[in-house]
Image (tube, rainbow, N blue to C red):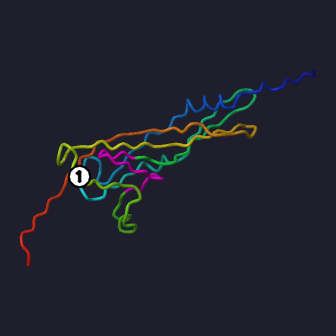
Amino acid sequence: MSGSREATPFDPRVLAEQARAVMRLPDPDIGTAPALGKPRFVNMASWMWVDAADWDPVSATASVSAGSVTVVATPTQVVWDTGDGHEVVCEGPGTVFSQAVYREAGSLDCGHTYTALPPGGAGAKVDVTAVWEWGVSWSTTDGRGGDLEDLSTSSTVAVPVSEIHSVVTHIR
């Protein structure tokens, strides 16, 4: 043999799992309109979103002398449990509510309309949970790659649900 040493082969999936294990994904930073702490009203749409600044891929790398593996987690969707037995799936982070966006677009791209009061009656709170799903892939310095099990992060907020009553006082 000459003085060179052949690189020790490595199992890229093992390294990929190591990189995946140390990857830190952000929890969803939940935003809603009406604002958190303010009631949602029965039969009126509520907007929901997560911070779009966090809607970027996250990566981690594990290395050995023979090469390295980079794992990338890419946001795919947010699944919302609205606390009233419904689930809303949003393919993006959702749009932050503003009067200008509302006037221009008219409807929300990620939201929910409560159709009944929660069991505790008007003003009772329901837990709204955002589960942020991430697709995970890996690649090596020598061109190999594949997919790993998806990851998810979640956050929960409690929001009050109420209703508005109207009274007709005079009909012409």
Residue 65 located left or right of residue 131: right
Q: Residue furthest front?
A: 85
Please name the amino acid that badge 1 sits on: Ala
Instruction: From the top left corner, tell me how far across and down residue 59 is, in percent.
Output: 59, 39
Please state if 69 lies on the left or on the right of 98 as rendered. right
Where is residue 83 drawn, in percent x and y? 31, 44
Indicate the secondary structure of the residue bearing disc 1: loop
In the rendered image, residue 87 lying in the magenta stretch gets the answer yes
Percent x, y for residue 153? 45, 38
Quarter assignment of residue 70: top right
Mainly helix, strand or loop, the magenta region?
loop
Q: Please give the name of the residue rendered at 8% of the width and 79% of the height, measured from the top-left corner.
A: 172
Judging depth in this view, the residue of 104 and 91 nearest the camera is 91
Q: Which residues are magenta?
A: 80-96
Q: Where residue 74 sits in the image (x, y, percent)?
A: 55, 45
Residue drawn at (75%, 28%), measured in percent from left and top? 66
In the rendered image, which residue does mark 1 sit on? 116
> Residue placed at 52% from the left, 42% from the top?
134
Which residue is farthest left?
170
Q: Note whether 102 is above or below 145 in the view shown.
A: below
As for residue 17 lying within the magenta part, the answer is: no
Tell me if residue 117 comes above or below residue 11 in the rendering. below
